[in-house]
Image: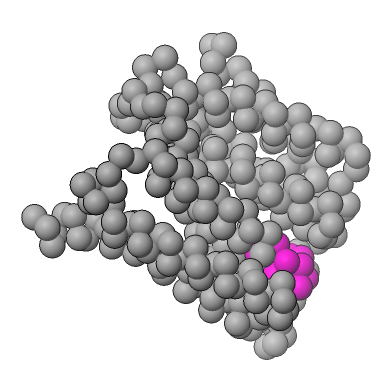
Amino acid sequence: MPDTLPGLSAFAIYAGLALWQGRGWLGAQPKNPSQLFYVLATLALCVHGFSVYKLIDTANGFNFEFFRVSSLIFWVINITVLISSIKLPVQSLLPPLFAMTALAVLCSVLVEGSYTPHALTYPIAIHILLSILAYSILTIAALQAVALSAQNHLLKTRRLQTAMALLPPLQTMESLLFEMLWAGTILLALSIVSGLFFLDDILAQHLAHKMFFSVAALCVYCILLFGRRVHGWRGKQAIRWTIGGFVALMLAYFGTKLVLELLLT
């Protein structure tokens, strides 16, 4: 029970905050969060983070079970969105995000799963966690790029105006996309660097393909962020580069599995 108490506490706070802030959704008028809301959200993040640590770093080794990793991913996303909400009007995203986080946290403490913990060194475990977080955040960024494209189309065709009123403005969604891209790119760079330092022999472990496409994806994202910073890239150009980086990232995962399991067998 002590190991599940932090997660259950985080679940209760997230669920309460989702209901509190979600009242504005009923009238399609999301309200700005109060200072108390941010205090409670910060408390939820602290308890949530402690819960993730206890669930992943177990006595039997590191447990990367699906729901535990999902809880970790939502923790990072919440930090990114909450920090972004200080300068961006993304309040309408908080109720559904906190509701999904509450569900992920609850599953992480109640569902055991069939994953067998592994006794890994901390450097290797950190590399794995960085890779999971980087690929997850950048996948969400790619999905948001697709949503941006759809949102732009709906605004131009003047359809679904009521539903669109619940979402942040197009420019705000675009700014949040780049917040996600910055977070994901930094995590991806750290995962690549940690892999170079902590993995003994990349070629011997058949990880060269994964490293190549990961570096290629990192280059694409860095070019996009540079273009945004210097030339103000946005709209279709930003969406295309985001999807391009995501394709390279998927080749790092699925391309490597294809080479190892089909071509080299």
Q: Main secondary structure of the magenta part?
A: helix
Is residue 27 visible in the rendered image? The answer is: no
Query: Relative to residue 212, is residue 98 drawn left or right?
Result: right
Residue 165 painted magenta: no
Assign the N terminus to one quadrant of the image: top right
Q: Is residue 198 visible?
A: yes
Write down the quadrant of residue 13 in the picture. Answer: top right
Q: Which residue appears farthest toward the left when viewing the image?
A: 265
Q: Is residue 136 left or right of residue 14?
A: left
Question: What residue do we see at 39% from left, 26% from top?
Answer: 121
Of 73 and 244, nearer the camera is 244
Quadrant in which the C terminus appears: bottom left
Residue located 54% across and 16% down the image: 3
Q: Residue furthest bottom?
A: 157
Bounds of the magenta segment: 167-177
Q: Residue at x 36, y 27 (%)?
A: 120
Q: x and y percent of residue 204 in the render?
A: 21, 47
Near-viewer residue (170 or 218): 218
Residue 237 in percent (x, y) is at 60, 82
Question: Could you say where residue 86 lies in the image, as x and y percent from the top left?
Answer: 84, 52
Q: Nearer the viewer, residue 263 or 58?
A: 263
Which color mode does the image show? one colour
As displayed, is residue 163 above or below residue 122? Answer: below
Q: Is residue 174 shown in magenta?
A: yes
Residue sitting at 16 percent across and 54 percent down?
Answer: 261
Outermost residue on the top side: it is 2
Name which quarter of the figure residue 263 lies in: bottom left
- In the depicted view, which residue is nearer to us: 75 or 156? 75
